[in-house]
Image (spheres, rainbow, N blue to C red):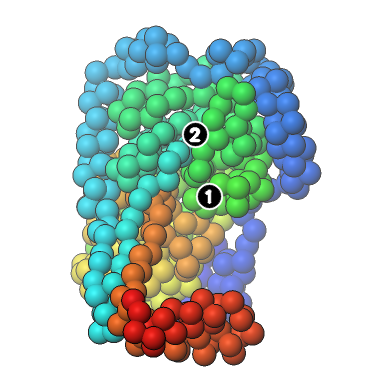
Amino acid sequence: MPVFLSNADQGFESAFRALLSAKREDAPDVDDAVAAIIADVRARGDAAVIELTAKFDRLELTPATLAFSAAEIEAECARVPEEDRAALELAAERIRAYHERQMPVDQRWTDAAGAELGWRWGPVDAAGLYVPGGLASYPSSVLMNAIPAKVAGVKRLVIACPTPGGVVNPLVLLAARLAGVDTVYRIGGAQAIATLAYGTETVRPVDKITGPGNAYVAAAKRRVFGRVGIDMIAGPSEILVIADKDNDPDWIALDLLSQAEHDESAQSILVTDDAAFGQAVAAAVEKRLETLERRAIAGASWRDYGAVIVTRDLDEAAALSNRVAPEHLELCTADPDTLSTKITHAGAIFLGRWTPEAIGDYVGGPNHVLPTARSARFSSGLSVMDFLKRTTIARMTPEALAAIGPAAERLAVSESLEAHGLSVRARLDRLNRGGA
C-alpha cells in the first residue's frame, strides 16, 4: 500500500522528510567495472566494442556492421504500420515546432564607454544520443533528443542503441530518420558511452552525449564528463498530481500509473485537499492494477514509493510540491493557471484535468527529458540550449580603452598579475603619446 499522509497530523513533517529522502534506486557500485570498460575501449577500440557487445548483447558484429546500413534502415522502416508512422510523424512535427521557438538570438551593442559588446550562439559540431534497447526502447525518446539537436544546428548526429540478440525496434529507426540522425550504431552500455566520447577506428567521437540509460550508462556518463558534455544523470521517473475533488478518480489513478509502469523504482504522488477523494483515487489505482499489462512493475512502484498526501488547501499543496520538485507535475484543479504561479520547482507542468502527462511524453511538444530526484530545483529539461554554446564578443575602441583600461590595470596589480596590467598599460601609454 502507498503512504497516506495528512499535514494536519502530528509527525507529518518527519514522515514527509522521510518520503523525500527515500532512496529509490537500486544502483549497485558499478564504477570500477565501468572504468575498466572505458579503459578497454580507449585502448583497443573496435575490438573491445565488438567483444563487449558479444558478451552483453549476444550479438556478433564487425567494424563494418557496428552501424546499420542504409538498406537495413530502409527495410526496418518499411515494417512500421501506417498508423504508427503517422503518429510518429505528428509527434516529430509538434516537437520540432516547439523547439524552434527556443532558439536564442545573437546580440551586439555599444555601451556608454564606447565598447562594443555582445554574444553569439553556435551548435556543437557533433552529438551522440544514447537510446536504451530491449523493453525500454522508446522511439519517442529518439525524437525528444534528436530534434532539439537538429534544430540547434548540430552538424553530425549519431545514435547508440543496443539490439540484444539482434532484435531491432523499427520505430526507433524510423524516429531516427524523421529526426535527421546521420548514423545509428547497434552498441549499448558503458562501452557505447566510451565509444561516443573517445571514438574508435570506425566511430568518430562526439562533443555532447545525451539520453537515458541504466546504472552502467549513468556511471559512464559521469566518467566521460569533461571530455564531452552530457545532459544529466537521470533517475527513476516521477509524477506528482495536485487534484481537487472535482476530478474523476480513475483519470487521476491512470495518471499516477502512467509513471509507475515505467520502473519499480518510479514514484507517483497525489496531493489533494480532500481526504475522501484521495481514498477514492487509491481505490481506483488498486482496481486498475488488477488488469494493467505492466501491473507487476506498476504495483511494486505504487506499493513501495507511492503516496497520497492530504493538505488543508491547495496553497499548501503547492508548497509541498515545491519541496518535492517533481519531474512531472499535473495541476488538476479548477484554476490551474493561478495555482501554477505558486510553483517554483518542477521539470514540467501540465495544466488542467484535460492535460495528462502522457501527452507530454509523446505529442505535446515540450521535451520529455526532464530533471529527476529533486534536481528541478536547479536544472531544466532538455532543450536546444543543450546543443548550443554561447561565445561572448568584445571590441575596445581607443576611447573605450582609455575610459575603462585604468580600472583593469589597477585590478591586475591588486591580483599580482603583472603581465595582465602591462598589456593594458602598453596601449594606454601609446594613447597618451598621441598614438592609436
Asked if the residue under mark 1 is in contact with the one under mark 2, i.e. CB atoms within 8 Å, the reply is: no
Q: Residue at x 44, y 57 (%)?
A: 327
| Residue matched to label 2 | 131
Indicate the quadrant containing the C terminus: top left, top right, bottom left or bottom right: bottom left
Residue 400 visible? The answer is no
Indicate the quadrant where residue 90 lies: top left
Give the x, y percent position of residue 81. Answer: 29, 17
Label 2 vs 1, first from the N-terminus: 2
Q: Is residue 382 above or below residue 5?
A: above
Measured as percent of width and height from the top left, residue 33 is found at 77, 39
Three-letter code, disc 1: Gly
- Residue 228 position within the rendered picture, expressed as x and y whole percent measured from the top left: 56, 47
Q: What secondary structure is found at the residue carrying circle 1? A: strand
Residue appearing at x 48%, y 79% in the figure: 426
- Judged left or right of residue 306, residue 242 is left
**Pointer 2 local density, CA inside 10 Å: few below 14, some 14–19, many at least 20:** many
* Residue 276: quadrant of the picture: bottom left
Identify the residue shown where x is 51% and y is 76%. 423
Residue 129 in view, yes or no = yes
> What amino acid type should be assigned to the residue bearing mark 2?
Val
Q: Residue at x 51, y 64 (%)?
A: 374
| Residue occupied by mark 1 | 229
Q: Nearer the viewer, residue 281 or 313?
A: 313
2 or 1: mark nearer the eye: 1
Q: Quadrant of the N terminus?
A: bottom right
